[in-house]
Image (spheres, coloured by chain):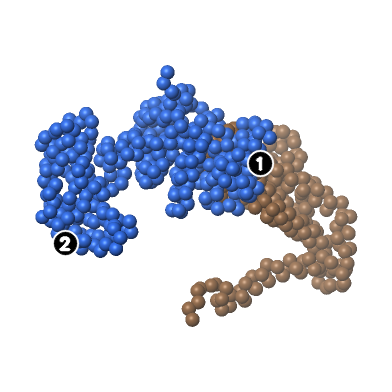
Chain colours: A blue, B brown
C-alpha cells in the first residue's frame, strides 16, 4: 500500500457571500501534500492561499469538497480537535503569559500532566534556542524571538501538520534569511509536514520541496522549485515566478521536443516544449532575463533580435538592461552578472543585439 | 527661530487653563472646607470640627438611604457589567457584519435619550407592572439602574476588546482549547481590567443618579442623592456638606482602586 498523503484536498470550494456577491476564494481545488514535506502555497494576495490554509486549520469550513488528514476526512472538525497547529502572521502570542506558558498552552489544553509539559517546553525552548528567555513576557522580547516562540508553541504538541501563514513577512531582510534556514532545520529535525503560505517567490523557491502556485482560488501548477521556474505551466506562473520576457510567435516545425518558432521581433528561435503539447499556430515563448546577453547589433547569431538600450539599472551583483525591440513595442529585460571592476559595456541609447543561450526559450501552454 | 507649534506655549493658554480648573474645583473645595465648619451657618466659618460628620452618621435616614444606594448600585453594577461583557463580546469578537453599527446604536441609546424621557417612561411602565404584580420593592430601582448602567459598563469593556487581537482566540482554538477554555484562559484574563473599569463606572453612575431614581422610587425608597435633594429643598445645613464630602471620598477611593489594579495588570 502506498503511503498515505499527509493532507489531501479533494475538490474543495469555499464561497463567501451570497447571490451576486458570491465569491469563490477557493475554487474547486485539489492537491495532495506528502508526508514530511515542506510544501508552499504561493500566490499574490487575494489568490486564496490563506483561505486554503484556514480551511486546513479549521478556521473556515469548505462550501464543498473533502479535506483528508492521513486518510481521515476532517473538513467538518472544529480546529481544537485537529492535530494541526498554526504559526500566525501576527504570531498571536498570549500577552498575559510568559514564553514558557505560551509554549506549554497546547499541551495544557490537551490535559497532559505537568511534569510532561515542563519537559516538553524545555525541549522546545532548546530547539528554538530560547532557554534564557523562558520566564519573559512576550512583550519583552524582540520580533525575531517572538517568531521563535510562535514556532515552538505550534510545534510543542507534536502536530501531524504545521501551517505557517506568511510568518516571515514582519521580519527585516537579514532576520528573514536566518529564519528561512532555521525553518528548514526545524522541519528536518522534527519530521513534521510543513505547509507554508507566502507571496514571496524567492522564499518559496529557496525553502520548498514542492510549490503550488495559486491564482483566483485555483492551483495553477504544483512542482518542485526547478520545475516551477524552468517549466512554468502557463503565462501567470511564468510571470509571477521571477522576471520573464514574453514573445509572440508561430510554430513552424517541431523535432524531438524542440520547436522552431517564428517571431516577428526575433526571427526564428528554437524553444523547448512542454510534454504532450501539440499546439499549432500562435504561441507564447518565455525567456528568462539571465539567459540572454547583450552584444553588438551585428553579432547576434542565434537570434536576430536588436533594439535600443533604454535603461541600465545597476544592482550590485548584476546589472539589468531594458531593451526596446525593433518593433518599437516590446520591452525586453535581460540581466548580466557583474565582473570585478568591469565598466559598462553598453550605454543608454546604444543600439544593441541580444544573444540567447541554448534552450533559453520555452513554449508556453496557453 | 522656528519652533514647532505647541498649544502649551500659546499666549494666554495658562490663564485659560487655570480659569477652567478654578471653575471646576473651587466650589468643591469650598464645599469640603465648610463641611468642617464648627458653626451652624454656611455663611460664616467658626472653627474646625467634625460635628456635622458625627451628626450625619447618627442620622438614621442618612444611614438607610446610604445602604439603599449601595445595595442598588451593587446589584445594578454587577448585572449591568455581566450584560455589557456579553454584549461587548458579541459585537467585537466577530468579523464585522451587516447591522453591527445598528447594534452599537441600540446598546448605547440610553446615553443618547434624554434621561428625563427614560424616567417618565419607566414611571408609567412600572406603575402598570406594580398594579399587575403588587410588588413594590427595590426591584424596580435596581432594574432601572441596571438598564442605564449597561452602556457605561459597555464602553470600557468594548474599548479593551477592540485593542485585543482577534487571532488570539483562533490561536487558542488551534492549540486544542475548546471555546469555553479559550474564553477562560485567554479572553477573560486579558479582558479583566476592562470588566473592572466597566463595573466601577457603572457603580459610580448608579450611586450618583437622581433623575430616574426620583421618578421610579416608591415612598420610603430614598437613595442618598434623592434624600439630599429633599433635605436641601427645606434647609441647607453643613450636614449636607459633610455627606457630600463623604460621597466625594468614596468616589475618589473607587477610582483610585481602579487605577492601582489596572496599572498592575498592564
- Between B197 and A76, the residue placed more toward the observer is A76
Q: Nearer the viewer, mark 2 or mark 1?
A: 2
Question: Residue A130: which numbered mark, if any?
Answer: none
Q: Secondary structure at mark 2?
A: loop
Q: Look at the image and tell me in which quarter the C terminus of chain A lies.
A: top left
Q: Which residue is rendered at x = 44% and y = 23% of the image?
A: A4
Look at the image and tell me in which quarter the N terminus of chain A lies.
Answer: top left
Identify the residue shown where x is 16% and y is 61%.
A350
User: Residue visible at 32% across and 39% down?
Assistant: A226
Chain to which mark 2 belongs: A
Residue reaching furthest front? A340
The image shows residue B154 at horizontal and vertical percentages of: 61, 47
Residue B14 visible in the shown view:
yes
From the viewer's perspective, is residue A356 above or below residue A160? below
Task: Give whichever of A184, B225 is nearer the camera.
Answer: A184
Q: Residues within 10 Å of mark 1 (few under 14, many from 20)?
A: some
The chain letter under disc 1 is B
Q: Secondary structure at mark 1?
A: helix
Q: Percent position (x, y) of residue A60?
A: 47, 34
Task: State the separation of the CA atoms marked 2 and 1.
Answer: 77 Å
Identify the residue shown where x is 65% and y is 48%. Answer: A135
Residue furthest toward the top?
A1
Q: Residues within 10 Å of mark 2 (few under 14, many from 20)?
A: some
Task: Report the residue that reaches farthest toward the bottom.
Answer: B1
Q: In x, y percent, where is residue A107? A: 61, 34
Which residue is labeled 2 in the image? A350
Q: In the drawing, does residue B152 fall left or right of residue A244?
A: right
- Counting from the top left corner in percent of width and height, residue A66 is at 42, 25
Asked whether the residues under marks 2 and 1 belong to the same chain, the reply is: no
In the picture, measured across the screen, residue A287 lies left or right of residue A25, that is left
How many labels were placed on the picture?
2
Residue beneath label 1, please? Answer: B82
Amino acid at each position: 500500500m502506498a503511503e498515505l498523503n499527509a493532507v489531501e484536498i479533494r475538490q474543495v470550494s469555499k464561497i463567501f457571500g451570497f447571490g451576486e456577491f458570491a465569491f469563490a476564494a477557493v475554487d474547486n481545488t485539489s492537491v495532495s501534500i506528502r508526508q514530511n514535506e515542506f510544501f508552499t502555497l504561493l500566490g499574490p494576495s487575494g489568490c486564496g492561499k490563506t483561505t486554503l490554509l484556514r480551511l486546513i486549520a479549521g478556521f473556515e469550513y469548505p462550501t464543498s469538497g473533502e479535506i483528508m488528514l492521513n486518510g481521515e476526512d476532517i473538513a467538518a472538525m472544529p480546529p481544537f480537535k485537529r492535530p494541526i497547529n498554526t504559526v500566525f502572521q501576527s504570531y498571536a502570542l498570549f500577552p498575559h503569559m510568559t514564553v514558557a506558558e505560551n509554549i506549554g498552552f497546547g499541551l495544557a489544553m490537551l490535559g497532559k500532566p505537568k511534569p510532561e509539559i515542563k519537559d516538553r517546553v524545555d525541549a522546545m525552548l532548546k530547539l528554538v534556542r530560547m532557554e534564557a528567555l523562558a520566564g519573559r513576557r512576550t512583550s519583552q522580547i524582540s520580533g525575531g524571538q517572538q517568531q521563535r516562540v510562535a514556532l515552538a508553541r505550534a510545534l510543542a504538541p507534536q502536530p501531524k501538520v504545521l501551517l505557517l501563514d506568511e510568518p516571515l513577512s514582519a521580519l527585516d531582510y537579514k532576520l528573514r534569511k536566518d529564519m528561512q534556514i532555521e525553518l528548514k532545520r526545524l522541519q528536518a529535525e522534527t519530521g513534521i509536514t510543513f505547509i507554508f503560505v507566502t507571496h514571496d517567490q524567492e522564499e518559496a523557491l529557496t525553502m520548498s520541496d514542492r510549490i503550488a502556485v495559486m491564482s483566483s482560488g485555483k492551483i495553477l501548477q504544483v512542482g518542485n522549485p526547478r520545475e516551477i521556474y524552468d517549466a512554468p505551466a502557463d503565462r501567470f506562473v511564468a510571470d509571477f515566478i521571477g522576471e520573464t520576457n514574453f514573445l509572440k510567435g508561430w510554430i513552424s516545425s517541431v523535432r524531438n521536443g524542440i520547436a522552431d518558432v517564428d517571431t516577428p521581433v526575433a526571427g526564428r528561435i528554437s524553444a523547448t516544449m512542454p510534454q504532450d503539447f501539440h499546439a499549432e499556430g500562435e504561441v507564447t515563448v518565455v525567456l528568462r532575463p539571465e539567459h540572454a546577453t547583450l552584444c553588438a547589433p551585428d553579432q547576434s547569431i542565434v537570434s536576430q533580435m536588436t533594439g535600443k538600450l533604454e535603461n541600465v539599472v545597476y544592482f550590485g551583483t548584476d546589472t539589468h538592461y531594458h531593451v526596446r525591440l525593433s518593433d518599437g513595442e516590446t520591452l525586453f529585460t535581460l540581466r548580466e552578472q557583474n565582473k570585478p571592476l568591469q565598466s559598462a559595456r553598453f550605454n543608454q541609447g546604444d543600439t544593441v543585439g541580444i544573444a540567447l543561450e541554448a534552450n533559453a526559450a520555452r513554449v508556453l501552454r496557453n | 527661530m522656528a519652533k514647532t507649534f505647541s498649544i502649551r506655549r500659546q499666549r494666554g493658554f495658562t490663564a485659560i487653563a487655570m480659569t477652567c480648573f478654578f471653575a471646576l474645583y473651587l466650589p468643591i473645595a469650598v464645599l469640603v472646607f465648610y463641611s468642617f465648619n464648627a458653626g451652624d451657618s454656611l455663611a460664616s466659618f467658626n472653627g474646625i470640627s467634625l460635628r456635622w460628620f458625627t451628626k450625619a452618621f447618627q442620622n438614621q435616614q442618612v444611614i438607610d438611604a446610604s445602604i439603599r444606594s449601595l445595595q442598588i448600585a451593587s446589584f445594578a453594577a454587577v448585572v449591568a457589567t455581566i450584560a455589557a461583557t456579553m454584549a461587548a463580546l458579541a459585537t467585537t469578537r466577530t468579523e464585522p457584519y451587516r447591522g453591527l453599527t445598528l447594534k452599537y446604536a441600540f446598546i448605547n441609546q440610553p446615553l443618547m435619550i434624554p434621561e428625563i424621557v427614560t424616567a417618565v417612561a419607566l414611571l408609567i411602565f412600572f406603575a402598570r407592572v406594580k398594579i399587575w404584580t403588587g410588588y413594590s420593592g427595590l426591584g424596580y430601582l435596581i432594574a432601572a439602574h441596571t438598564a442605564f448602567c449597561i452602556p457605561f459598563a459597555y464602553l470600557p469593556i468594548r474599548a479593551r476588546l477592540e485593542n485585543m487581537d482577534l487571532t488570539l482566540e483562533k490561536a487558542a482554538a488551534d492549540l486544542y482549547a475548546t471555546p469555553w477554555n479559550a474564553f477562560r484562559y485567554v479572553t477573560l484574563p486579558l479582558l479583566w481590567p476592562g470588566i473592572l473599569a466597566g463595573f466601577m463606572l457603572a457603580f459610580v453612575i448608579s450611586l450618583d443618579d437622581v433623575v430616574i431614581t426620583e421618578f421610579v422610587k416608591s415612598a420610603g425608597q430614598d437613595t442618598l442623592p434623592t434624600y439630599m435633594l429633599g433635605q436641601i429643598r427645606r434647609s441647607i445645613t453643613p450636614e449636607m456638606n459633610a455627606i457630600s464630602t463623604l460621597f466625594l471620598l468614596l468616589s475618589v477611593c473607587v477610582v483610585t482602586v481602579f487605577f492601582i489594579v489596572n496599572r498592575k495588570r498592564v
